[in-house]
Structure formats: structure tokens, C-alpha cells
Amino acid sequence: MPEDLWPAETTRSDRLHAIEHGEGPLLVVGAPGTGKTELLARRLAQLAGAGTRPEDVLAIASSRTTAARLRARCEALIEGSFAELWIGSWDAIGERLLREYSEEAGLDPFFDVLGRGERLAILLDRLERLPLRRHEIRGNPAGLLARLLARIDRLKAERVGPTTLAERAAAATPEDDASREEIRREQEFAELYATHDRILAESGSLDRGDVFLALDCLLVERPDVRRRIAERWPYLMVDELEEATPAQLAVAGSLATDNPNQLFAVEAQGGAHRAEAHHGTAVRWFDGLFPDAPRVTLEERFRDPQLSFWRCTSERAQAQGTARAVEHLVAAGTAPEEICVIVAEPAKGGGAVAAAMEERGIPFHLFGPTALFQRPEVRDAIAWLRVLADPGDSSAAARALTRPPVELRSGDLARLTTIARRRKQDMVAACEAALDSPQFQPEARERIGSFLKLYANAATIMEEQRADVFVRRLIEQVGLRRQRLFAAQPEVAERLLGLSRLAELATAWTRREPHGSTRGFVAYLSAVAEAGVEPEEAEPPAPGAVRGMGAAAVKGLGFDHVFVLGMEEEADWERIGWPARSGLVFSRVNREAAGEAARPSRYYEEVLAGAEAEGAAEEPHEEELFGPAEGLHATYRQLREQVLEASWRAGRELSEPRLDTAIDVNRAIARYLELLKLAALAQRPGDEPTEEAIEAVNGLLRQVATPEQQAELDASALDAYLLDSERERGRRLELVAAREEPSLAAFLPRRGDGMLSLSASDLSLYLTCPLKYKFARVFGIPQEPTINQRFGILFHNVLERFHKEPPANELEGLRVLNRLFEQGWRRTGFGNSDDELQFRDRAKEALRLYWERERLAEGEPVWLEKKFDFKVGDHHVRGRVDRVDRLPDGDYELIDYKTGERKSEEDLDDDLQLALYRMAAREAWGIEASTGSYYYVLDGDKVAAPTKPDDAERVERTVLQVGEGVLSQDFEPRPSPKVCSWCDYRLICPAAEA
């Protein structure tokens, strides 16, 4: 029953009353799945049937997708012709109304409405105009501005302007220094808010919030305009009223002054759910506007999907289970576009799902912030753009070199990065040097040469052409578009759509910045992608693709089957409503902490508790390294391409017959029959052995194949290949577990004796993400130090110099610290930007706190930057300790300076670094150090890490574990939102793709 169509026998009086409602306001209340959107469509069709022109009804939905769905139903239900339907989202209708009456509103009729991405680019170009002295930039202005823009948007939706915000801050009473600083920061934000609006006004632009504020002001101040709008659209219908912002509700309220013929649909209360707050605000607004208006409550729900609950061991297991279930659904006849996968945040949870779908060849379209920038083909284009704009961008160069069309092997990439580091060159210059290096085989030199040729051609025209023209030329020149035979396949169409969308972004940017350079566009693109800001008007999905979207985006939509993933996290899950008609899966990852199973989200628990009363139970799902059909799927996809090529050749020969044409035709048909065989084997039910299944399928194929085609099938090596793959599956598992990759063995970090060399940071890096360790330590991809790293190095150097040459007396201490800092500040190249001055202010205060503590300290520094090197098993453990103090009782304290966020003793309960340092003091220096502390210099606080009896055993176990992983080249990524959001290698990491 697609699109929630009601059964013919549904004639309940409540629905008929709403559909046939005459004059005056009406509120329709219903739970998810009760057909509120369908009711609005039928209401419009009824009005049209009663003589009202369809174009006289203004219908508003909460999103573009919901509006499109409502429009489609209205067009199907309305009999006869009509001029146009005024159906759209709040944003679309608001902008259109404001343009229609722009002269009355005092606006340029050609104003632009800018999304968050466009505004971010404008603010980054005018960073020096923005008051940000009290907002911590921390080397990431794009990320900070993206968060501030999100707050500006929220305030405008709540009808709070910069003047009101400044007045609130001025009226606040500070209780202490912290609250006083918070007030000052709020006042600065109010000034930033006003500056943001001035910058937009100067460019003749508005943001989405401005549209409704200007429209509301117009309707209040110009009663004549309000009356004209009411006369033009005698009827107003609003779907999902609970999603409307206060600014949007104000517009609807102003329109009601002259036209009370309004019908609003609102979602019923969700009990203890957060949806109740949205419902309550909308209903209170309606009751305040129309205190005596009737309301209709819809009780009957038309969606009754079968509920399933999954408990998965990992995100990978969850994604694999979803892809496997989707594949079975598609094989059973469900259209891919009728399947939806929901995650809390697409940017964080969509990558694993996309990878699992790709493994099974299932077209998948991910919506949401940064979804476009997670696509491999778009990331390839961005990599080329970035390396052309900055040859020193090593991550971009590495991706451009290792992805098609160059496809340099990993060992050769490691050799390239070695050249770049040793010669202190960028990766492009290292490529030129590699052409004359005997380290590279001819094939590698050929690939590097093709990269340099493409690079030189693109660099030549980069400065001569507009950004939009250059981006399209680059896509074609580098071959990123790679048109294929039968490009109408959904997965190919998805890739082409992504590249087209990138080109459209370049066109839109060029329109806004007609004098901007391609480098400026690359800077904009990088900032938007890094900040996680979604470009406006995301592209529609290609037909035949499974949808992936966030919880907030799916509301009001309907699919046959829906998978809701990641429900171990607390999120606004209530907003998904009831989106499935046939099957609804709720899935969570069962992460264990301290031996205890983690609890799922509250919403998951509530839904599961309700379903358990009817006999439902959780299904366990574990990760499969190689499922029984994984090899079959890969072989199927490979053979599919061969079938297409064989049919093309056979077709060409049919147009020009030769003596052997029949042979080629029979060969093409035989390849197609083999494709059918693979499809049958991959989808066979039960645990039937592969050998028996092959024999059964072959028997069926003999019944349809001609003798000539059967001869081709008998001569094929496919059956032997499949049986060999089955027999060697166990060996494949062992090889993958060992991760043997001899080509990288020469690039692992070793000492002169051949033993692996590890440091505390190496251990932490590998445990955090083995793939990041590979990029940083094995490939050694050069990275420019961030402002945070530069500041940390400066502070370490200042403190080292200070203790090497201590002051003559206490009065000189702080002065010496400040003098050393000023000298280092100038030498390190820091300037006078807000970001740098914030670091400077924090450093001055930190030095004061440091001296106040140091002059009272009992310990005496005896070693600074003390190195160590000792063996654990077959591995060297090396490093250095920032400072070693001798305490009055003769004991020693190991101190490590930190310029990052302070951690408590509880946070350091399982700390590895200081435990390793204590072991190093005993093994390398022959002393016992009972205390290890982190000195958080910016906070002026020293925190001791807990000492445990098994520390040495834990360090040894970790070193051996990491060493084994590195030597076996186990570099599988471990994606997590907290780590990935700050990773320097996001552009080249496959786990960040969708």
C-alpha cells in the first residue's frame, strides 16, 4: 500500500470531517502512520472538486521531500487541469512569497538566499572583520564559524536578533570571574551576529532565517499586502506543524488575521518522548490563535510493519547485517528506493553502511551534511583540486597518486614519501625526483609520469579559467567521470550525479564570486567539507538506489523497509515517526565497558519493551570476515563487466557477419548463463555445500543451453575457481588475520638491528587507529604542523630553556619565563590574528601560574628531555621524558607537559604513557620512579596518574600486541566520530568514504 493510500473501505467520520471541512480553522492530530499527509492531499482534491481552483490553496510542508510527496499525491488525486500547485517546504514557499512582494518589503527582487556553506565561505574571506577575540579558534576557524552560524540560525528561528541578545548579556549579573568572562563572550557573539548580518546586507543577500523575519515584518507592517495574500490563497494547509519554528509560526499567524481558513496537521504526543515538547508548542500556538476551533484526532494507523531488534557486536557487524538483509529484500523483488537506512548522523554513521553496500554491489545514496564530500569520486576530485592549489598538501597528493587513474602501489607511495621527507620537498617535487631514482620499477615510474603529466596539464590552465569551467575540465581530463558502457546502472549514475553536483557547486560559487580564482573555490570547498556543512539543495538520488539518511530527515516519508542503526546512542529518535510499511528494524551496537554490556538508548528500550509483550526478542549479529557468499558476490560483479563487454563485441560482429560470428555469439550467451549461475549460488537458501549446488545449477542450465553453448560452459574454469575458493577459504582467513603485505616490510620503523622501534605515541596512535599509524609512521606522509602543535612545541622549549638556566632569584623567575616566551614567539613565526593572540593570552597566564607553583615546589629538576631506549620482547621501546624531578625523600617524579585539555585522575585510570615511562626509568636508567604526572600547563595543574601493581605487565602486553599488529601489517581502520573528526588523513582514509 504505497504512499499510505487508504483502503477503499476507510470511511471513518473523523477523516471525512477533516476532508470536507468548510470555512474556518481546523487542527488534525494523529500519531505517525495515521495518514495525515494523505488527508491533506485528499482535502485539496475535495476543494478542487467543489469548485476551488487548486492554485488557490497554499500548502506547506516541513521539508522538500515531504512537500514533493504531498505534491505527487495531489497531482494524482485532482481531476481536471490546473495552472499550478502552490505546494512547497517552508523555505521554498517563504522565499517565493518574499520575492513576489520584494518591492513592498524594501528588498532587491534579485536577492540571494544563502545557506550555511555559502555564508561560511563569505565569513572566512572576511575573517579579519569578525570579533572573535573571546572565542577559542584553536587553529580551526571553519569549525568555529560553522558552530556560530548554527547558533545564529537557531536564534533567528526563535526570533531573537543581535540587539536583543546584547541587551540580555548587558542585563546579566556576573557572580564570579568565569561568569563575567561568559558575559563578555556573549556580548562579543552579539557583535559577531550583527556583523554577520551587515556582511550579508552588503552583498544583497539573506539567510533562511532572514526570509521569515522579513516576511513577518512585511505582513505586520503592511496590512494591504496581508489582505492581498489572503485573497490570492483563500485556503492554507500546513503539514507537520510541530516542525515549524517560532518565526514560521509567526508568519502563519499573520496570514490568519485576514484568512482563517487554515488546516494544520500535527503529530500526536509521544508520551515521555521529546516529541511531546514539539507537539505542545504547536498545539498551544494553535489554541492561542484559534481558541474555539475544532480538532480531529486520527486513531487508525495504516502502517503496521513487522518489528525486529538487532544486537550487534560492532558497527561493522551492524553494517554487514544491514547490507545482507537489503540484498535479500532486493532479490525478493523490493525496489531499492523503497528501502531506507537511518543513522543518527550520516557524517559519522553512514560510511560503514556505504562500505558494506559497496561490497555487495548495492546502489546506496547517503543524504545529510558532508554526504556529498564522503563519496569516493568527489573526494578524488577534491584531492586533485587541493594538490593543484597547494603542492605541499601531502594527503591530497597521496590520494591523487593512489586512486584511479594513476593507482600507484602502496610500497611505491612509501618510497615517495621517504624522498619527500629526506629532501624536504613537496610530493609533486618528490615525484619528479622519483623518475630518476633506481628505487622505482619501470611500471611505478610510468604511473608517476602519468600523474605528473596530468598535473602539469591541469596546472597550466588552472589560473586561466573560471572555477566552474576548470572543475568540469579537470573531471574530464583526469578521467574521474569515466563513462562506462550501460552507464544507466544505478551505482554508476550515482557517481556521475556526485561529480555533477561538485561542478554545480563550482558554478554557484563563481556566480557569487565572479572575480574569484580557482584557488579561492578550493579554499571554500575545503572549508565547507572540513566543517561538516551541507551545501544547499542536495542532489536527488539516482533511481534504483537504497536511501541513507539521518533521523531528522526521514520524518513524514514512507518506505517498505526501514533499518534504524546506531540506537545505542541517545539521539532524537522520536523524530523518525513510523516510516516503514512492511518491515522496521531497530539495531544497536552492544559495546562492552568494564565487562558490562552497554545499555541501548532509552527510545530503543521503550520500543523493545512494548514489542516483547508480543513475543519479540533481540537477534544477535556478529561480524563476518568472509561470509559464505562474499566471494560469489565479488565474482558476480567481475563477471558482469565481462558479460557486458562480450555482448558488445558480439553485437558488433552481428552487424558485420564473419565466419566465426556464431562462435562469439555462443560465447557471449555462455558468459551470461554463468552470470545466472553465480546469482543462483549467491542466493541459495540453507547451508548446501557449494559443490552440490554447482552440480544442481549446471543440470538446469544443460536443459536450456545449445550444444555449442554447453561446450563453452564445459570449457570454462569458473566451477574449478569457485571450488578452489571454497577450499581455500580457511587459508584466506589466516592470511587476512596475518595481514601479510611484504611490500611494506621495508618501510616499518626499525632500529639498526632490525627490531621494530616503538614509542609511547606510536602505541597510542596504533591503538587509536592502525590505519592512521600506517599513514603517519609507515608511509610517513608529511604534514604541516598545526597551530596547536606549534604552540605546544614552543611551550616545551620555553620550559626546557628555563630549567636549564634557572633564574638567580625568585624575583627574576617570571620575567625570565616571559622573555624566553617572547623570543620563541617571534622565532616560531606567530602573528597577530585573533587565533594566535588567544594562544598568547593563555600562555601569559599559564606562565604566571607555572611560576607561582614552581617557586613553591619541593621537587628539583634533575633531567630535562631525558631519552630512553629498552627492549620488550623483540621490540625496541624508545622516547624521552620532558622532566624528571628528585623529591625530598629521594624518590623520583616523571613529568610530561601537556598543553591540551586537562584530565582528572579518574580519566587517567588506565593511562599507558606514564606507566611506560616508569618502566623505562627502571629498565634504561636504573632508578625507581613511583610517581608520574601530567602537567597541564595552561591550567596550572599537575595530575598524578594512578600507579597499579600490574602496570609493567600491562605495558609489556600492549607493546607485544602493537608490535605483532605492525609486523603483520594489520592496518585496519577503527573509525570513531571523536577520532575521525580531527584526523589529518581524512581525505585518504577509506573509512571516511560513503
Image (cartoon, rainbow, N blue to C red):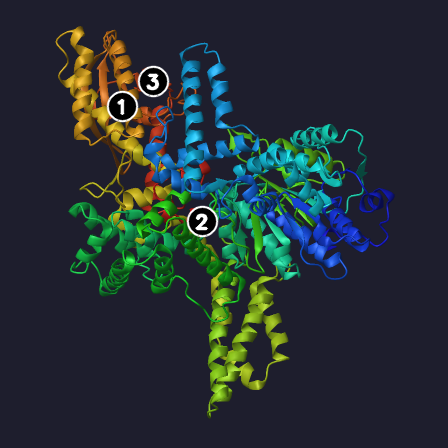
Q: What's the amino acid at mark 1?
A: Arg
* x and y percentages locating residue 874 in the rendered image: 27, 38
Q: Tell me how far mark 2 sits from mark 3, CA to CA.
A: 37 Å
Circle 2: element type: helix
Q: What's the amino acid at mark 3?
A: Asp
Q: Residues within 10 Å of mark 2 (few under 14, many from 20)?
A: many
Tags 1 and 2 in contact by the CB under 8 Å rule? no
In this rendering, the label closer to the viewer, 1 or 2:
1
834 or 257, nearer to the observer: 257
Q: Which residue is mark 2?
A: 374
Q: Is residue 239 visible?
A: no
* x and y percentages locating residue 265 in the rendered image: 72, 40
Q: Tell me how far mark 1 sits from mark 3, CA to CA.
A: 14 Å
Q: Which residue is mark 3?
A: 939
Q: Which residue is mark 1?
A: 840
Looking at the image, is 824 positioned above or below residue 149?
A: above
Q: Residues within 10 Å of mark 3 (few under 14, many from 20)?
A: some
Q: Tell me how far mark 1 sits from mark 2, CA to CA.
A: 36 Å
Horizontal side, residue 460 vs residue 522: left or right: left
Looking at the image, is 401 positioned above or below residue 487?
A: above
